[in-house]
Every structure is written in structure tokens, then in C-alpha cells.
Image (cartoon, rainbow, N blue to C red):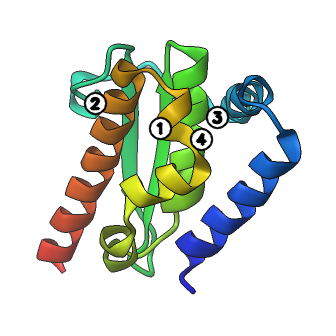
Amino acid sequence: MSAIDAELSELIDEFELLGDWEERIRHVIDLGKSLDPLTDAERSDLNKVRGCASQVWLVTGRSPDGALTFRGDSDAYIVRGLIALLLRFYSNRQPDEILAFDAKGGMTRLGLEGALTMQRSNGLFSMVERIRRDAREATAAA
């Protein structure tokens, strides 16, 4: 089992303890409150994620061992929470591990698809695609 799959299992367990979707969405929002804020310079057009209704920024870094690190922020509370979920899956992972993870399947297993509006789902997958693009670029540069 990959580290991302282990993180998914842990999140599934957390969500099952919460019960209904109102509690789960509150938990997602609470996760977003733990994000470190981005600097004004990091809130640049270069870091902005296209395809999101809210303002979303993702900053990608690389650790010495080649793992990708991500930081993010949004002007919407629930989107900040979704960013926090994605960071649990993807930050500090090798590019090949990121590319191997089925994000859509993972979100389905979490039950997020039914809880998010179409607009939020599209934004979530725009963020995933941006992370995957950065992983592909890191793989090509290696």
C-alpha cells in the first residue's frame, strides 16, 4: 500500500466517525484552518489554479530527495479544506507516486462527490490536475 493509499484509508476512517455530511463538511473546513498562509508574493498569477470558481493558489516545491511539496490557499473556507485534503494526499510524495494515485477514485471512496456541488468538484479536479501536471514536469526534468 502506498503512502497516499494509507492516507486515504486514514481519512475514510475519520469521515466514518463523523457520521452525516454536515459534520464531514465542517471537518473539511476545519482542516483548511490548519493551512499555513501564503505570502502576498505567493498569491501570484503563476500560482493561481485555473478552473476554480474561488481564488485558489498552489505553490509547488521540491525536497532534496525529489519529493514534491505543496502549499495552498483559497478565499473560500470549504476550498481551503479541500486543499488541506489534497495536501495530505500529495505533499512530500515522489512524482511517480502522485501520478499513480487515482484521485477521482479516492474522492469517490471518501464520498466527496455526492457532497460537493458540480462547481466545487470541477475546482477540486482542477487542483488535482495542476498537482499532476507539476508531477509530470518533475518527472520529465529528472
Which amino acid type is shown beneath numbered disc 4? Answer: Ala
Element at label 4: helix
Marks 2 and 3 close (CB-CB < 8 Å): no
| Distance from Cα at disc 2 to Cα at disc 3 | 18 Å
| Distance from Cα at disc 3 to Cα at disc 1 | 26 Å
Residue 44 pos. (x, y %)? 29, 23
Residue 130 pos. (x, y %)? 26, 45
To which residue does mark 1 refer? Answer: 113
Residue occupying image coordinates x 80% and y 50%: 16
Residue 55 sits above or below residue 31 on the image: above
Tag 4 or tag 3, which sits nearer the N-term?
Answer: 3
Residue closest to the far left: 140
Residue 20 sits above or below residue 63 on the image: above
To which residue does mark 4 refer? Answer: 84
Tag 2 or tag 1, which sits nearer the N-term?
Answer: 2
Question: Which mark is on residue 36?
Answer: 3
Element at label 2: loop
To which residue does mark 2 refer? Answer: 49
Residue occupying image coordinates x 43% and y 72%: 67
Residue 3 pos. (x, y %)? 58, 77
